[in-house]
Amino acid sequence: MAKHHAFRTDIKGLISLFSQLSGQGYSQIGPLVRDGAIMLGEIQSFDDLAQGYTDEQAQGHYRIKPIPNKGLFQYAVGPQSFKQYLHPPRRKLWSTNGTNQNFTVETGDKPQKMVFWGVRSCDLEAIKILDRVFLEGAFVNKWYQQAREQLLIIAASCPLPSANCFCTSTHTGPKPESGFDLGVHEISGNNGIYYLIETGSQKGEKLIKKLQLQWASAEELESMERMIEKAASSMKKRFEPTEAAELLKKTLEHKYWDEVGNRCLSCANCTMVCPTCFCTSTEDITDITGEHSERWLRWDSCFNGDFSYIQGGKVRGSTPARYRQWMTHKLSYWYHQFGTSGCVGCGRCVTWCPVGIDITEGLEELAR
Amino acid sequence: MNKKKLAVWKFASCDGCQLSILDCEDELLTLAAQIEIAYFPEATKTIIEGPYDISLVEGSVTTPHDAIQILEIRKNSKFLISIGACATSGGIQALRNYVKVSEYIKAVYASPEYIDTLETSTAIADHVKVDYELRGCPINKYQLLEVLSSYLHGKKPTVPDHSVCLECKLNGNPCVAVTRDLPCLGPVTQAGCGALCPHYYRGCFGCYGPKENPNTEALASYLSQNLVDDHTILGLFRNFNAGSPAFSKESKNYEKQ
Ligand code: SF4
Ligand code: SF4
Ligand code: SF4
Ligand code: SF4
């Protein structure tokens, strides 16, 4: 039986939600079609949202294609995650003007007030992980904190997981359970598409109230549960995160590391697309006069030599060492650091690896 | 304070990298205020005698005369920076390293006896000690300014040696290898261009040469098993950086027996 209450609407309810939010000065970020992929970007008008598309994903392979179903969420996650906006690829920390004796310092831009449309459950859990990384402990990332405090999240469940999704294994999907303001479920019924909306916060409730929607019927709630069960059971990739964490502790000297190291290009794509990889470097730029300098934060990766460079050399010079660092951190000692696995089962690292290396196959090899 | 003296030299090259210097336009005046441009025939007739504080060297060594001249330049320069694919790996003209040059000369020139050339096109660092190598075909003018400014202000230049892929992702390009099955050298090529080609739906041509720790063998074998024929792979690695050790070695694996 369905436990939740939900509101029901057709697409018009979402459109009026969109206008309501525009009126409140939000920058609205959501999935849109760009350059043959579902990317994230600013949604200027509701029509900008990707609609009537699905995707096809395999190891090192991604395509989108139009489908007769004119739904908004009939595809799984694309290469970008909302990390893009909470922890941007490049961000100016500060700049300075003047000479040694006399200089001024200016901080970089402040985060915008944002709403995220269509956050899938895996990415929602990834945001919770980033929260632990940036907000807990002795050092709080103020920029992230500010972005996060102003953020409104409209989550969406997944009717059609991709062949690389494995959120059932990581217990992070396909239905958003918590951590959203509004949770949207797109149901393709006999009489067309309709949406069930759950509220997850007071902010969300306030927004919904203004829309004056009806309650969903018991049958509609059941259709939602059925859709989610179907999506969950369609996922074929499997592993048990706690077992993986233990396995990796025992296999630090396994021959798999050399095997995967021979195939891996240490190109860093997997870490760029991973919604929980958070590592950065700082870069300093000085202009020719020496009177203007800037410090930037940019995404970095354990696959780069410079990243583990300390006086005297690189801690991880070889590709096997780098791959092992990535996988063991993500799947094993992330538990010690942040209390959970670092993987939310989105499958991006598998899809966007240019040579199709698959983290779940790696676990199988290591268990052998 | 005396201004640092800069010289710009040219060997076998297309002048594209020197043009990148001229392309600095707005920054050129600021540059000229900090640095004395003492020798730069492409830009000015004025010639101020050496020794020079900084020499920028474009082009590869392809003639016996080049091989002697670069020694002179080294003697006359405190800090020598080789710029561009020609100067750092021999350039596109390093394709000659894989053929018999004398036969080509016979085929092309009416009076081959006038041609005095070496069998190979080689990087500046193969002849003299180079203090800094700036990659690219052509170089990125912002990286050049960063290197010059770092030299003037005593800092390490921010010129990362990671893959083009990282830049591609920072810039929000959907990967053309994954979405379009295009052969792309990005995973083994050093960043610097801003992932220009993938942005325009092309695979990376490898203009910035091999990245740190390049696994050319794995990329080539994946391409050969899944996407393209061996001849195409040969062409990918025999390009602007054909003479770089990593690309050169990989290309030989795909030569027809
Ligand atoms: S490790 Fe891979 S599957 Fe797991 S969260 Fe990161 S990108 Fe997604
Ligand atoms: S991993 Fe799960 S939540 Fe994420 S896109 Fe796939 S099905 Fe949806
Ligand atoms: S696993 Fe794939 S994406 Fe990750 S660094 Fe290696 S080759 Fe690149
Ligand atoms: S398009 Fe090329 S450079 Fe960009 S991520 Fe893909 S393989 Fe790397």
Image (tube, coloured by chain):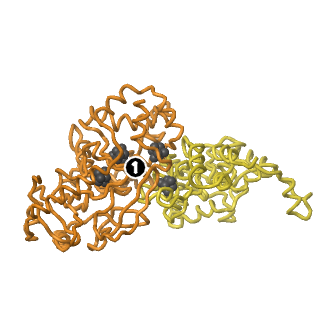
Chain colours: A orange, B yellow
Give the side of residue A198 with respect to residue B101, left or right. Answer: left
Mark 1 burial class by Cα count in 10 Å: few <14, some 14-19, many 20+: many
Callout 1: CB less than 8 Å from ligand 4:
no
Residue B169 figure quarter: bottom left
- Residue A303 lies left or right of residue B100; in this view the side is left
Residue A289 x, y percent position in the rendering: 46, 56
Instruction: Indicate the quadrant where residue A97 lies.
Output: bottom left
Q: Is residue A143 visible?
A: no
For label 1, the SS is helix
Front one among A57 and A38 = A57
A114 is higher (above) or lower (below) than A271: below
Residue B151: x and y in percent read 53, 47
Locate residue A68 relative to residue A110 in the image: left or right: right
Quarter of the picture holding the C terminus of chain A: top left
Amino acid at the residue labelled 1 = Met
Which is nearer the eye, A1 or A144? A1
Q: Chain of mark 1?
A: A
Reading the image, the residue beneath label 1 is A272
